[in-house]
């Protein structure tokens, strides 16, 4: 009997349109943040994940980036920057997520995406969110999956993992006895030895 569904986040539950970074950096100049050399661009992109991982909200994330950039921005301007960052860097749920919201199983998300970015999506309020901070490990480490099972008080044979990565979602889940279902939205995963779906309405047959 399946009691828990563990979902990957980015690429499975939600998508983020990759920003046009050249346009993005040009817009930051309006907020006194100048990223106008390849070296500065790479340095700024390298601090984005760390800043996001250590942030509790979009406001916190914005403030951290301002500090990292060494900029001085007044409160009203910071609010405008926060709004811009949220529009450009936030995720949007796939439309078919609605098909899993009423499933009776417990639901968890195992992701590297910053927790505040996930929890800010109203459709996921009933999901328990696990990032490396909660599990002490990142996918594909087995410790990350085991931490979810322990927290949710479920045995491996009572759980299903749904994700879009063979290496990071499917193989480690299978390695500890969790049933794995590959989310293959574009129908391009050929010759893969696991259950597959292209839409969430197909998930029920594997529960």
Image (spheres, helix red, strand yellow):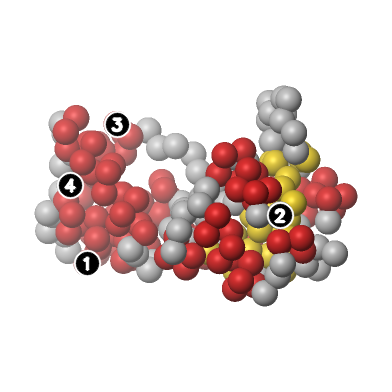
- Residue on which the image places disc 2: 177
Which of pointers 1 and 4 indicates the residue nearer the eye? 4
In what element is the residue under mark 2?
loop
Q: CA distance from mark 1 to mark 3?
A: 26 Å
Which quarter of the figure has residue 70? bottom left
Instruction: Residue at 24% x, 60% y: name it.
Output: 64
Q: Mark yes or no: residue 94 visible.
A: no
Q: CA distance from mark 1 to mark 4?
A: 15 Å
- Residue on which the image places disc 4: 33
Which of pointers 2 and 1 indicates the residue nearer the eye? 2
Q: Is residue 13 left or right of residue 77?
A: right
Q: Earlier in the sequence, mark 1 or mark 3?
A: 3
Q: Earlier in the sequence, mark 2 or mark 1?
A: 1
- Residue on which the image places disc 3: 22
Q: Earlier in the sequence, mark 1 or mark 4?
A: 4
Q: CA distance from mark 3 to mark 2?
A: 45 Å
Q: CA distance from mark 2 to mark 1?
A: 51 Å
Q: Earlier in the sequence, mark 3 or mark 2?
A: 3
- Residue on which the image places disc 1: 75
Q: Is residue 112 left or right of residue 45?
A: right
């Amino acid at each position: 009997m399946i009691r828990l569904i563990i979902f990957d986040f980015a690429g499975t539950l939600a998508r983020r349109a990759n920003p046009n970074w050249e346009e993005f950096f040009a817009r930051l100049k309006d907020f006194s943040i100048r990223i106008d050399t390849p070296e500065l661009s790479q340095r700024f992109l390298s601090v984005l994940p760390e800043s996001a991982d250590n942030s509790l909200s979009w406001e916190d994330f914005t403030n951290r980036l301002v500090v990292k950039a060494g900029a001085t921005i007044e409160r009203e301007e910071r609010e405008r920057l926060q709004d811009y960052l949220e529009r450009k860097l936030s995720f949007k749920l796939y439309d078919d997520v609605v098909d899993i919201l009423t499933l009776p199983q417990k639901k968890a998300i195992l992701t590297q995406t910053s927790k505040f970015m996930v929890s800010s999506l109203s459709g996921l309020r009933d999901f328990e969110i696990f990032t490396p901070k909660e599990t002490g490990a990142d996918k594909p480490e087995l410790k990350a999956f085991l931490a979810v099972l322990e927290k949710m008080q479920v045995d491996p044979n009572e759980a299903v993992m749904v994700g879009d990565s063979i290496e990071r979602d499917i193989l480690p889940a299978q390695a500890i006895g969790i049933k794995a279902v590959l989310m293959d939205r574009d129908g391009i995963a050929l010759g893969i030895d696991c259950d597959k779906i292209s839409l969430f309405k197909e998930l029920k047959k594997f529960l």
